[in-house]
Amino acid sequence: MSTEREQFGSRLGVILAIAGSAVGLGNIWRFPYIAGENGGALFIICYVIILFCIGLPILMTELSIGRAAKKSVGYAFETLEPKGTKWHYFKYLIIAGGVLICAYYPVITGNILYYLCGVVDGSLLDKGISAHDQYQDLVVENSYKTVCFSLIAILFCACCSWFGIKKGIETVTKPLMFLLFIFLVVLCGYSLTLDGASKGLELFFVPNFEDMTLKSFLNMFHAALGQVFFTLGVGAGTILAYASYMKKGQSLFNESIIIASLDTIAAILAGVIIFSICTSYSISVGAGPVLVFESMLTIFKEMPGGHLFGSVFFLLLFAAAITSFISMYESTNSFMIDSFNVSRKTAITINTILVGVLILPACFASSFLADVKPFGMDIISFEDFIASNVLLVGGAFIFSLFCFTRYGWGMRRFIRSVNSGEGVKLSRFTIGYIKYAIPMFIFIVFVLGLIV
Ligand code: TRP
């Protein structure tokens, strides 16, 4: 194993890589429709409060463990835990969450790549076939296409990781993130000029208290908590892996605020785009997983300039998805490098084969395996449920106990690590809040996740 750990080349590079991990399908595809289903503006207020009060401290735990240990989750606990304790056994649970997400995230990314190619060359914009039939063709009749495009997405990530952190990951994620924010702003501007945009904005931004009941409030609260975990990408060791390549220059509280703000801005811009377009074309935003593949494609076929708009939209979605997938992929690579002492190239080769096989159930979820319905869910929803509602929450709980209690790394070392460097520091007043409230909140999410 090399003695000197590689580092990101610049502060901007780290922030954009971590923001790239955070801004993904969760922001552009999941956030708008979850917000739509859960009362629009009220959900957004609740989401932003939870993001900054609960998500931020959890984000800091991963950042501080990674930066202090200079190791991924594969060896971070061993490096920091008090002698004789067994925190390192939890690493398998944490990496399991990351691996399970790798089993379906590249499949959706692959489908997006297929749509990007089809919209750019115009073949998917054919008005003679409905968007529904086109989607069925991809995922049911010709699901081998999903396999091919998912494998291309995986190989793309493998190539990025192959060249290391600075030359590979940083070189790719930095321009992609710039592109993503430029496209978000441009598409947002354009969608606001559409006729029905004001109706969309109203739905998205004006709170609706009328039908609020205790049950719907609890549902909304749980949806917002789940969204915060998924969008920040905490609990699976992904952020921890990136943080292990970070320099000590800035306070981690400072960096977390920037990352969480970029993530929220991306989600809100995406919400404005999708709500404005959908209301302008009288299409429901609650279509769920098929929203971008069916509803949005139908609109691109009809709208003037749909070819250009659709191409940019899918490029945006692809950039968001691929930078997130690169981060998950890197976390499993660095796990292998740190725990089994193998070279980066060996880890990438093994990982690529492993993920290439793991995606197969999700690729065939609507075709050969359509009848396989664990707990009544299709395979992708089931994998997502176990990963997001059980493993990510469990991972976040372990990180917080490790940082906040004296049985683990301890509050003093955590605060010192977070505050080392320039920028806004965490004040001592917040310690009591962080120490008791955060693990309790995570526990609530876990229980709510299983019963709601
Ligand atoms: N945050 C990403 C999104 O919004 C997904 C993601 C990246 C993720 N890394 C993760 C989710 C780690 C869970 C765990 O799409």
Image (spheres, rainbow, N blue to C red):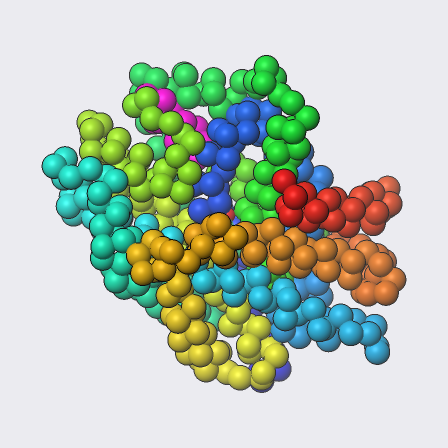
User: Viewer-proximal residue, 244 or 105?
Assistant: 105
Question: In the rendered view, would you say 427 is above or below 249?
Answer: above
The residue that appears at 49% across and 24% down in the rendered structure is: 204
Image x and y of residue 137, in percent: 22, 50
Image x and y of residue 160, in percent: 40, 66
In the displayed orientation, state which residue is furthest to the left.
Answer: 128
The segment highlighted magenta reads: 268-280
User: Viewer-proximal residue, 35 or 162?
Assistant: 35
Residue 355 quadrant = bottom left
The residue that appears at 54% across and 18% down in the rendered structure is: 206
Residue 10 quadrant = bottom right
Left or right? Give the position of 119 relative to 180. Answer: left
Q: Is residue 18 in sight in this rendering?
A: no
As for residue 428 lying within the magenta part, the answer is no
User: Dividing the image into 4 quarters, which one contains the N terminus?
Assistant: bottom right
The residue that appears at 55% across and 77% down in the rendered structure is: 336
Question: In the rendered view, would you say 406 is above or below 201?
Answer: below
Image x and y of residue 411, in percent: 84, 57
Left or right? Give the position of 101 relative to 315. Answer: right
The residue that appears at 36% across and 60% down in the rendered structure is: 369
Look at the magenta stretch and give its main secondary structure: helix
Q: Is residue 315 in sight in this rendering?
A: yes
Left or right? Give the position of 416 relative to 193. Answer: right
Left or right? Give the position of 118 relative to 438. Answer: left
Question: In the rendered view, would you say 112 is above or below 302?
Answer: below
Image x and y of residue 344, in percent: 49, 78
User: Dividing the image into 4 quarters, which one contains the C terminus?
Assistant: top right
